[in-house]
Image: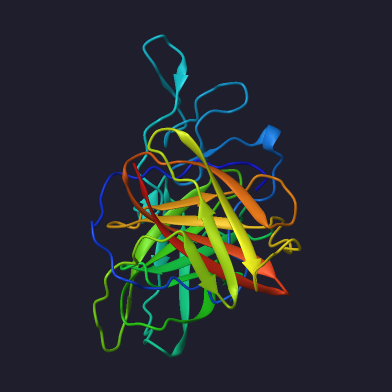
Amino acid sequence: MHTGVKITAFAAALAATFGTAYGVGAGVGPVVVGEERPAARHGERQPGGHGERDAAGHGEPDAAGHAERNAAGHDAPAARAPGGLQVSERGHTLALEPSALRAGERGELRFRVTDAHGRAVTAYEREHGKELHLVLASRDLTVYRHLHPVRGADGTWSTPVELPRAGDYRAFADFTPAGGAALTLGADLAVSGAYRPAAPPAPNRVAEVDGYRVELAGTPVPGRAAGLTLRASRDGRPVTDLQPYLGAYGHLVALRAGDLAYLHVHPHEGPAGPEVSFTATAPSPGAYRLFLDFRHGGKVRTAAFTVHAH
């Protein structure tokens, strides 16, 4: 996570007016994906977490393992759907088991990742110290959880979860199968209970969480890398002793309003606060909900922002 990471490819889509809401990370477990890699050896990730080109300038292979070539005969990156929008990709499928999750009640979510033959995947590369990272988000972007489930010997993953509101959610599995490329698969998840529609969160550049104030500077730019800096303070004083969280001082996940296309951005290497910097590229104009996870005082907290890329 010592590198800036390219935002997952998002197509345009969003609502023009947003109401107030809060994206809250519950500090239930480690949050993001991808093992710490030096910037010199790890390029920005494409949609779904894939590098556009390697250090030698070669295009990344497509689903069949072949790199596309441009008119000049040089390798060019293959086009892919945005991360998290597909339940199946490159022979892998996210299979959620039937669950009876109810709003406000603690339940268990179980799922498997299967290969092209329908067999449960049991071998993974470790990313940020974990084999798989699970993100749950409500369709209105008012609820967010980043969890780390436990895998059984048969390949079934499970995690306790409590979601505060009923409605439609999206589950994202972010992982790298052993010997393969990074993937982000998504599947719909329903949480029962009294449902009251809520407007998506309003645009904001300041987030307050547990007495911390986090300010966002910078704006994603479609088609061009742009810097994002988040500055943390508490009681008016800069926080200069952020604690490493899975090897980094901050992790950023972004979801596009409208379809919840998924992206994950890693921070640049730097001091332990008060600023954590990222580089991200928005592939299209639109509204994005950014979730920053950071650790301080032994606890992981999440600050959430809504920004427009234009």
Q: Residue 310 at what x, y percent from top left?
A: 34, 41
* In the image, farthest residue toward the front: 236
Tell me where residue 64 sits by quadrant.
Answer: top left
Residue at 50% x, 25% y: name it. 59
Query: In front here: 144 or 100?
Result: 144
Q: In this figure, which colouring scheme has been used for the structure?
A: rainbow
Q: Residue 1 at what x, y percent from top left?
A: 65, 48
Instruction: Tell whether 238 sits left or right of 109.
Output: right
Instruction: Tell whether 89 sits left or right of 272.
Output: left
Residue at 45% x, 47% y: name it. 48
Residue at 34% x, 64% y: name it. 202
Identify whether 118 is placed above or below 155. above
Identify whether 119 is placed above or below 151. above
Count of numbered circles on the image: 0
Instruction: Tell whether 127 sits left or right of 222.
Output: right
Q: Residue 132 at what x, y percent from top left?
A: 57, 60
Q: Is residue 126 visible?
A: no
Q: Is residue 50 visible?
A: yes
Query: In front here: 207 or 175?
Result: 207
Instruction: Tell whether 266 sits left or right of 62.
Output: right
